[in-house]
Image (spheres, rainbow, N blue to C red):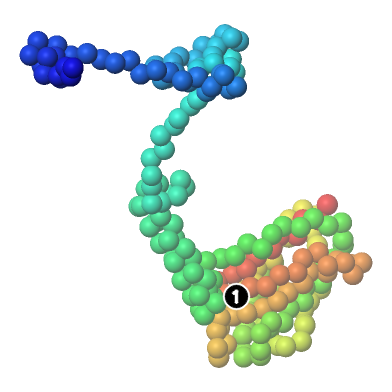
Amino acid sequence: MLIDAHAQLDSQNNSAAIPAEEKKDADNPSLDIKPLNNVGISNKKDDKVNGLSVPSNTNIVIENEDFSMFNEEFANPAELFQKQLKNNLRMKDDLETKQYGNTTNQFLGDFTTKALYIKVVYRDHEYFDGDRIRVFVNDDVYKPNILLESDYKGFKLDLLEGFNKIDFQALNQGTSGPNTAEFQVIDDAGNIISSNRWNLATGVKASIMIIKE
């Protein structure tokens, strides 16, 4: 005898749920994993999630970092533009200095010595093109007109106690420009106190200070 169970259940507007049989693996009981719903992590040593121990010092920190097309140093595009502009201006200044010479007076350092006198020698450090200079010592004209040549030439200077300022002023820029020179300051024992170069526009000075102790 057949019974239409489906029709009978529908007529009573009832439904029946048939529980699913949970099958456990006797050889591996750890596979009995329950759903994880809002599991909290505390500082207790016996905290467990689904039967697995969780370290008590577990700390999970997720930081949101904003994405930027610029690196951290130049987060503002205007700063990047300003740096590029400064670099371009610096390159332009270097090129103009090489072509036309420094247009502001140059201080090339101060030096201390116990020497009684010094020798100051100079030459055109590029090629001979007619560069001329005037030398001042403590603001007084010491050598009014010197032609810079390919070989060193110069003068001896007796030092005063204290400060001895020496200025080299460019009188012209030769035939190629700027006024270019290399010089050395040598003490009475033959030691080089200072060695440097200049690239000057006409009328500009390069200065050093010799301090006698």
Residue 98 or residue 54, whichever sits in front? 54
Image point (71%, 70%), residue name: 196
**Residue lying farthest to the front in this orientation:** 1
Q: Which quadrant of the figure has residue 210? A: bottom right
43 to the left or right of 143? left
The residue singled out by tag 1 in the image is: 199
26 up-or-down from 78: above or below: above
99 up-or-down from 213: above or below: below
Query: In the picture, which quadrant includes the N terminus?
Result: top left
Q: Position of residue 82 (x, y in %)?
A: 39, 56
User: From where the camera sits, is residue 63 visible?
Assistant: yes
Image point (87%, 67%), residue name: 191
Residue 184 or residue 26, whichever sits in front? 26
Q: Position of residue 192 (x, y in %)?
A: 83, 67
44 to the left or right of 117? left
Image point (44%, 32%), residue name: 63
User: From where the camera sits, is residue 202 visible?
Assistant: no
**Residue lying farthest to the right in this orientation:** 189
Residue 179 or residue 75, whichever sits in front? 75
Q: Which quadrant of the figure has residue 197? A: bottom right
Q: Which quadrant of the figure has residue 177? A: bottom right
Instruction: Kindly identify the amino acid type of the residue bearing the numbered disc 1.
Output: Asn
Image point (44%, 66%), residue name: 89
141 up-or-down from 51: above or below: below
Residue 167 or residue 53, whichever sits in front? 53
58 up-or-down from 177: above or below: above
